[in-house]
Amino acid sequence: MAKVLVAYYSRGGNTRAMAEAVAEGARSAGADVGLSPVDKVKVSTLVDYSGIVLGSPVYYGSMAAEVKRFLDESVALHGKLEGKVGGAFASSANLGGGTESTILHILGALLIHGMIVQGSHSGAHYGAVAIGKPDAKSLAECRELGKRVAKLAEALRAGGFPGTSCSR
């Protein structure tokens, strides 16, 4: 069974609601899910997860300082997260408020760790987004993100790749 961490920072509750939906999606795909604010997660425990999904509100076009600090501290694990599955989600106050740039900043850090990131050909291509309080569509995208991360993490753990006939 894949083990997925959904870690987030949320001041007003919007990003927390998204995190809960991501966790719900991962659970629905059979994953064992940890859900926690980033400041409650010990960076050293990241090695225990096969999937890691990070969420942040947008501040000045990028992630919250709390999420950035968490990623900065993860340098202690350099090389130890390779092959794990990653994902990201973000919330902002306005359309064009920086959600995609925030997601891409988070994904960039995960890629530097050697993690695997699966995009989506429909809906939220890079990760789930919400403008203000997450609506039904945003929450559905969050659940789908959780499912994708969990399914890919499990497939990699089991030695196969979802949606293909490829295996090790």
Image: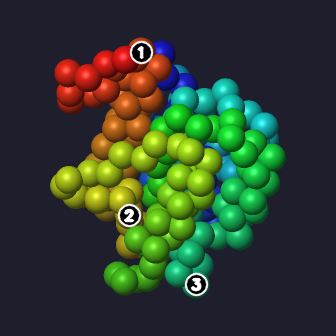
Picture quarter with the C terminus: top left
Q: CA distance from mark 1 to mark 3?
A: 40 Å
Q: Residues within 10 Å of mark 3 (few under 14, many from 20)?
A: few
Q: Regarding mark 1 in the picture, which secondary structure is present there?
A: helix
Where is mark 2, residue-wise? 129
- Which x, y percent locates residue 68? 69, 64
Where is mark 1, residue-wise? 158
* Picture quadrant of residue 163: top left
- Which x, y percent locates residue 115? 53, 43
Q: Residue at x 27, y 28 (%)?
A: 162
Mark 1 or 3, closer to the camera: 1
Mark 3: amino acid: Tyr
Q: CA distance from mark 2 to mark 1?
A: 30 Å
Front-lying residue, 20 or 55: 55
Q: Is residue 156 above or below residue 9?
A: above
Front-lying residue, 29 or 120: 120
Name the mark on residue 150. Answer: none
Where is mark 3, residue-wise? 60
* Marks 1 and 3 close (CB-CB < 8 Å): no
Q: Regarding mark 2 in the picture, which secondary structure is present there?
A: strand
Decide which of tag 3 and tag 2 comes sooner along the chain.
3
Q: Regarding mark 3 in the picture, which secondary structure is present there?
A: loop
Would residue 54 be seen by someone viewing this image from the given angle? no
Q: Residue at x 78, y 37 (%)?
A: 44
